[in-house]
Every structure is written in structure tokens, then in C-alpha cells.
Image (cartoon, rainbow, N blue to C red):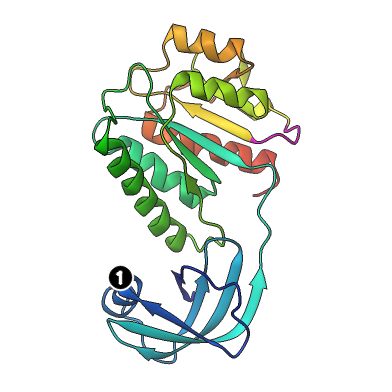
């Protein structure tokens, strides 16, 4: 399989053009992935443009790719959104990485009541940047044409507002309905995953009063790092993506 890389923009790129990777992307291609002249390469802009070509020049500072084919992939609808509660250690980052590989369309950091990790001030900016970096690398690994957005962190009240237009699904081990029984209705599907201590009763009341639905993922209680990716897999089947 051809190695895949990202460029900032390829809107005007056509067959026969040269696309250049520079900076960290070029270094990664030449030094880490050991790309060689003549190898097949795919390049995307993270917004649906998909280019296929061959490496013509390779160095740690610049990689030139001659484009042989161009296609554009439409964004999938409805979108699948993961609202991931902040968690200690790297558990939330593991969830973000796997969710991207499995096809999530947007990731929203959630400052839940029981989140041990707290994003405040400059830490919120750095945390979002860290998640965006993880998403970018996971998207390249998964050969995705669309780069998922990492939204700004939300509070529970801000999250409840999404239920006015989106279908918000709360992963709850005590829920009466199974996630696998959900029938998509055209609205974006927003999966909400709590932290290690789970979603508090007050948060459940606030979110369900706003229109969110409690759903059961399975008979076992999954970690916060695995619940979201597992739920995305279930919805991918329901949406016909898989």
C-alpha cells in the first residue's frame, strides 16, 4: 500500500502537477518512513482531495510528488461525533487515536464532573493541540481523505445544547436500550463517553432533559479509552459504512 501524507491545501492541484511536502512532513517521509524515489505515494489535504502519484525527489527538507490521479471524496453524512471526557494518563488520547482510525468525524473534549484531568487556561490550548496532532497522525495511518476536527473543550451545559439539533447518545452501563438497536434518523450521531468514574447523576439528568438518549454498549463495563471506539464500530455498521 502506498504511503499517505498530508499537505495544507491541494485545491488547485491537477494531474501532472508536482506536490511538495516540506517541513516536518518531508522529514517524516524521508527519514522515518524511508520513502524512496519512484515509490507510489498518496497525498491528501484533509478536506476530501485525494491525490495519487510517484515520488520524484526525496530529501529531509523536501519531497516532490508527481500527481497521476486526482479524486475528491464527499464528506460522509450523517456525521459521527465522539465527545470524550478528559481522563487521567493517556487514556483519553488512546480513545482519540482509535476513534480517528475507525472513522470518527469530529472529536470534542469534555470537562466532565468526574474528570481527574483538568484543562484550564493555557493547558486547554495545549491539550487541544495535542489531540489535533494525534488525530493528524492517526488519519495518515488510516489513509483518511477527511481529517476529523478537534473542537474546543465543552462543559456539560454546552454539550446539552447539541441535543437541540444532533442525536446525543450517552454511553451508560445502566441504560435500558442497546446502542446496536439505534436506527439512524439523519441527524448527526454524538457519542458521549464519561471519565473513569462515569457520568454523574446530575450530568445524566441535565443531558437527558435536553433530549439525549442513554444507550447500553454491552454486558461489560469498558474503559473510557475503549468505549468510544467500540461504539463507533457499532454505528459504522448501522450507517452502512462497514
Residue 187 is one of the magenta-drawn residues: yes
Answer above or below: position of 189 versus 94: above
Answer above or below: position of 1 versus 230: below
| Farthest-out residue, right | 185
Quarter of the image for residue 137 reads bottom left
Q: Nearer the viewer, residue 79 or 218?
A: 79
**198 sits to left or right of 189:** left
Q: Identify the residue at image location x=50%, y=23%.
A: 158
Crowd class of label 1 (few under 14; some 14 to 19; many from 20; radius 10 Å): few
Q: Identify the residue at image location x=68%, y=38%.
A: 238
Q: Identify the residue at image location x=43%, y=46%.
A: 98
From the image, give the main secondary structure of the stretch colored magenta.
loop
Q: Position of residue 17 (x, y in %)?
A: 56, 88
Quarter of the image for residue 33 reads bottom left
Answer above or below: position of 235 versus 144: above
Q: Position of residue 230 (x, y in %)?
A: 50, 36
Residue 212 is one of the magenta-drawn residues: no
Q: Note whether residue 216 is visible.
A: no
Residue placed under numbered mark 1 in the picture: 24
Q: Position of residue 22 (x, y in %)?
A: 35, 77
Q: Nearer the viewer, residue 218 or 115?
A: 115
Answer above or below: position of 29 versus 219: below
Q: Note whether residue 215 is visible.
A: yes
Q: What segment is highlighted magenta in the picture?
A: 184-188
Element type at mark 1: helix
Q: Nearer the viewer, residue 21 or 140?
A: 21
| Farthest-out residue, front | 121
Amino acid at each position: 500500500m502506498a504511503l499517505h501524507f498530508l499537505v495544507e491545501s491541494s485545491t488547485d492541484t491537477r494531474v501532472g502537477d508536482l506536490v511538495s511536502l516540506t517541513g516536518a512532513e518531508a522529514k517524516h517521509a524521508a527519514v522515518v518512513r524511508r520513502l524512496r524515489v519512484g515509490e507510489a505515494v498518496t497525498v491528501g489535504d484533509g478536506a476530501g482531495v485525494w491525490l495519487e502519484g510517484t515520488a520524484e525527489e526525496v530529501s529531509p527538507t523536501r519531497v516532490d510528488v508527481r500527481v497521476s490521479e486526482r479524486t475528491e471524496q464527499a464528506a460522509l453524512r450523517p456525521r459521527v461525533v465522539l465527545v470524550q471526557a478528559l481522563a487521567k494518563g493517556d487514556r483519553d488520547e488512546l480513545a482519540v487515536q482509535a476513534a480517528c482510525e475507525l472513522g470518527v468525524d469530529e472529536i470534542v473534549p469534555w470537562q466532565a464532573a468526574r474528570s481527574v484531568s483538568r484543562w484550564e487556561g493555557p493547558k486547554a490550548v495545549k491539550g487541544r493541540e495535542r489531540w489535533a496532532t494525534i488525530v493528524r497522525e492517526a488519519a495518515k495511518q488510516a489513509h483518511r481523505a477527511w481529517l476529523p476536527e478537534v473542537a474546543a473543550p465543552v462543559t456539560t451545559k454546552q454539550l446539552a445544547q447539541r441535543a437541540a439539533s444532533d442525536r446525543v447518545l450517552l454511553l451508560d452501563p445502566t441504560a435500558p436500550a442497546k446502542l446496536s438497536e439505534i436506527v439512524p434518523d439523519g441527524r448527526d450521531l454524538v457519542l458521549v463517553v464519561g471519565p473513569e468514574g462515569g457520568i454523574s447523576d446530575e450530568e445524566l439528568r441535565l443531558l437527558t432533559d435536553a433530549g439525549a438518549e442513554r444507550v447500553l454498549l454491552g454486558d461489560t463495563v469498558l474503559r473510557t479509552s475503549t468505549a468510544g471506539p467500540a461504539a463507533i464500530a457499532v454505528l459504522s455498521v448501522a450507517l452502512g459504512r462497514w
